[in-house]
Amino acid sequence: MQDSLLTGARTGLVRLALLALLVTGPTAPALGDEAATTTGADEALMQELEERIMKRLREGPWLQQQIEQGILAHERKKAEAQRAARAKQARLKAEKARAVRPVDANRDHVQGNPDASISLIEYSDFECPYCKRFHPTPKKVLDSYGNRVNWVYRHFPLRFHNPGAQKQAEASECAGELGGNEAFWKYTDSIYTRTRSGGHGFPLKQLVPLAEELGLERQPFKECLESGRYAARVKEDLDEGRTIGITGTPATILRNNKTGEVSVMSGAKSLAVFKTEIEKLLKPSAAEQK
C-alpha cells in the first residue's frame, strides 16, 4: 500500500516539477523544429529535484496522511465487498431452501400443532455433538410460541459419524413404527440425553435394550432394526437436505407455512436468535397489511 502511494506521489509531483524546470529553467533548450534533447546538467538537476521532493514527502505529514487515508479506503471497500458477498450468499441459500418439502403429518415426525403457522424443520445427526447441545432449544421454542410453531425432525447422518448415526436414525424410525409419534420422540430424546457423540457415543448394542426400556416390544423392534427397512427412509431425508443446500448439522429451516418464506439457520443457535427470526416470519407482509 505504501509503495503504491509513494510511486503515485513521486510520479505526479516529479513530472510537474520537471516540466516546469525544462520550460523555465536556465538550462532549458530552445524549442525548434528538431526534438529537444536533455543534457547531462538537466539530468543532474532532475535527480536532485527528485531527491528533494522525496525527502520532503518522507519527512512531512502529507505522505503519512495519504497512506492512512488509502488504507482506510481500502479497508472500507474490502468490508463492503465482504458484506455484499455474505448478503448474496444468504440470499442464494434462502432461495434454495424455499424448496424444502412442506410438512406432512402423515410422513414427518412433528411435535406441536401440525397446523402451526411456522415450522421449525431440523436436519440432525444423532452423533453430532452440536445437535446434542441444540436438542433442548426447539422445545423452548415450542414453549414460547405454543400453537404457532411446530418442530419437525428429519435425518441427516453425517458420513464420518456412521455407522452409529445411521443406525440410530433407523432405530428411531422403528420406535415410531411400533409406538407412534410419541415413541419416536421419546427414543430420540433418550439417545441425545445419553450419547457422548462423535460417532461412537451410544453403543449400537444398546439400541434394542433402550427400546425395551421405553416400553416397546423387544423382538419386533430387533427384527425392524436388523432388517434395515428404514435405511431408505433415512437416506431420503439426507438426499432432500442436500438438494436444498444442507451441508452440516444441526441445520434448521424456519418456514412460514402460509407464505412459503423461509429463514435458514446453521449450527446450535440460541433461543434468542430463533425468536428474532420467527418474529420476522410471523410479521405480516406489506401485501397482507393492505
Image (spheres, rainbow, N blue to C red):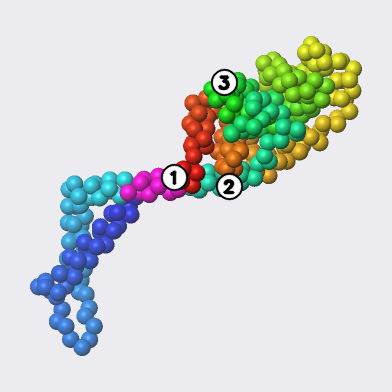
Indicate which label's residue lies in the foreground, 1 or 2: 2
Q: Which mark is residue 83?
A: 1
User: Neighbour class for label 2 at 10 Å: few (<14), some, many (≥20)?
Assistant: some
Would you say the residues marked 1 and 2 are in contact, meaning their CB atoms lie under 8 Å apart?
Answer: no
Q: Rounded to the nearest whole Å, what is the CA distance between mark 3 and mark 1?
A: 35 Å
Indicate the quadrant where residue 8 lies: bottom left
Front tag of 3 and 2: 3
**Residue segment shown in magenta:** 73-84
Secondary structure of the residue carrying numbered label 1: helix
**Which three-letter amino acid code belongs to the residue tagged 1?**
Arg
Examine the rendering and report whether any part of residue 188 can be seen. no
Mark found first going from the N terminus, 1 or 2: 1
Foreground residue, 196 or 22?
196
Nearest the viewer among 261 and 153 is: 261
Q: CA distance from mark 3 to mark 2?
A: 29 Å
Disc 3 or 2, which lies upstream in sequence? 2
Type of residue at label 2? Glu
Residue 62, placed above or below residue 46: above
Residue furthest to the left: 26
Main SS of the magenta part reads helix
Q: Position of residue 212 (x, y in %)?
A: 82, 13
| Residue 82, placed above or below residue 31 | above
Residue occupying the point 64% across, 38% down: 247
Residue 95's disc is: 2
Residue named by callout 3: 143
Q: Residue at x 77, y 13 (%)?
A: 214
Residue at (86% x, 30% y) in the render: 228
